[in-house]
């Protein structure tokens, strides 16, 4: 290496010199390309007796593709007033989505600004909930 290359190498943060930096850049580029999608995808994982993440913020400009994943051993039921805004539902949209262990459920929801609580409606799962904030 020339003295100039050594100087430039040492001026960069360690994370930029790491071979792991390249996949991170690729991941960020792919994420940015997905921003033009007509919908926002929100993943909520039910495991143990909690939802992760417990708080989600989304923009009101695009509908939400809501994906509930049950990664636990207990059945769960995602219940929220937000589900009243489901698109493509025939008749009255259901106010809850049951999700069996090691399964997932998905729905498309119109975004109307507001704060929407969600929780597991199964008896004995009290305290298992969260918030979706549409801004």
Image (cartoon, helix red, strand yellow):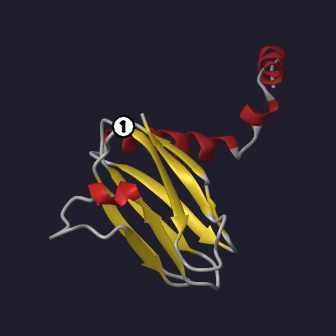
Name the quarter where the C terminus is drawn: top left
Horizontally, is 51 left or right of 79 in the view?
Answer: right
Residue at left offset 61%, top offset 44%: 24
Horizontally, is 31 left or right of 10 in the view?
Answer: left
Residue 79 in the image: above or below residue 17? below
Residue 35 spot, x, y in % from top left: 38, 40
Residue 81 in the image: above or below residue 106? above
Residue at left offset 55%, top offset 78%: 122
Q: Nearer the viewer, residue 45 or 79?
A: 79
Q: Nearer the viewer, residue 89 or 71?
A: 89
Residue 74 spot, x, y in % from top left: 62, 84
Horizontally, is 131 left or right of 107 in the view?
Answer: right
Residue at left offset 56%, top offset 83%: 75
Residue 5 spot, x, y in % from top left: 77, 20
Residue 107 in the image: above or below residue 100? above
Which residue is under mark 1? 113
Picture mark count? 1
Report which quarter residue 19 is drawn in: top right
Name the quarter where the N terminus is drawn: top right
Looking at the rendered structure, the secondary structure element under dot 1 is: loop
Crowd tier of the residue under label 1, counting other residues whose Cα lies within 10 Å: few below 14, some 14–19, many 20 or above: few
Residue 109 spot, x, y in % from top left: 31, 55
Horizontally, is 67 left or right of 44 in the view?
Answer: left
Q: Nearer the viewer, residue 107 or 22?
A: 107
């Amino acid at each position: 290496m020339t003295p100039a290359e050594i100087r430039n190498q040492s001026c960069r943060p360690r994370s930029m010199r790491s071979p792991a930096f390249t996949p991170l850049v690729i991941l960020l580029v792919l994420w940015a390309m997905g921003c033009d999608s007509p919908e926002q995808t929100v993943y909520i994982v039910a495991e143990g007796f909690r939802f992760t993440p417990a708080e989600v913020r989304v923009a009101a400009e695009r509908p939400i593709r809501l994906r509930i994943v049950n990664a636990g051993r207990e059945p769960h039921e995602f219940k929220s007033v937000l589900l009243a805004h489901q698109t493509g539902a025939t008749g009255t949209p259901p106010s809850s989505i049951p999700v069996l262990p090691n399964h997932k459920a998905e729905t498309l929801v119109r975004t109307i600004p507001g704060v929407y609580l969600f929780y597991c409606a199964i008896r004995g799962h009290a305290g298992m909930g969260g918030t979706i904030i549409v801004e």
